[in-house]
Amino acid sequence: MKKNNGKMSGHSMSIEAKCEACQEIFLIRKNDLRSKCFEVVSLHPAEIELLYYDCPVCRKRYFVQVKDDRTKELFNDLEEASTFLGCREPGKTEAKAKFDKTRKELSRYRDMLKAMHEGSLVRDNENDCSYELRFTK
Ligand SMILES: [Zn+2]
């Protein structure tokens, strides 16, 4: 059971960012975030999907989030639990407990993934570029 389309909280959300390389200040909107598979080529070889944006001026790449099979699984569980949040007791309490537990697990797992790959070299096989992975806080 899946809900249609992942959605971001809030409407036309944008975040102001400042490029560390060229000092440009720019807005990041949802559409500026891109997601692609990268190959981790150091310590912990893996295929991970990274969410990133580029500085519009100097093209410096900023990585913001990581996904792999486990995060996708947890994300699906989270969406499934959220579809039951609107139902009546006692289903609601159960769904809420599952939702909270899964959300915690997802956040814990993502932090672990980030810590594991932080500083690693990731390769973009499409354009043969490698980047040192530093997650933007
Ligand atoms: Zn820049």
Image (spheres, rainbow, N blue to C red):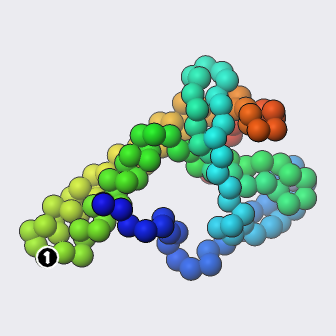
How many residues crowd around disc 1 within 10 Å: few (fewer than 14), some, or many (20 or more)?
few
Which amino acid type corresponds to the residue marked 1 in the rendered image? Arg
* Residue occupying image coordinates x 85% and y 60%: 56
Splitting the image into 4 quarters, where does residue 89 fall? bottom left
Would you place residue 127 above or below residue 34 in this image?
A: above
In the image, 47 versus 54, the foreground residue is 47
* Residue occupying image coordinates x 23% and y 68%: 84
Would you place residue 92 above or below residue 67 in this image?
A: below
Q: Is residue 5 left or right of residue 19?
A: left
Q: Is residue 29 left or right of residue 127?
A: left
Would you place residue 25 above or below residue 44 in this image?
A: below
How far from the left and from the top, in percent, is residue 77?
32, 53
Q: Which residue corresponds to mark 1?
A: 88
Q: Which residue occupies the extreme bottom position in the image?
A: 11
Task: Ligand 1: give its quadrant.
Answer: bottom right
* Screen quadrant of the N terminus: bottom left
How far from the left and from the top, in percent, is residue 86?
24, 76
* Residue occupying image coordinates x 74% and y 34%: 125
How far from the left and from the top, in percent, is residue 16?
72, 68
Q: Is residue 54 left or right of residue 76?
A: right
How far from the left and from the top, in percent, is residue 100?
29, 57
* Residue occupying image coordinates x 62% and y 45%: 50
In the image, 120 versus 79, the foreground residue is 79
- Tell me the SS state at disc 1: loop
Is residue 136 visible in the rendered image? The answer is no
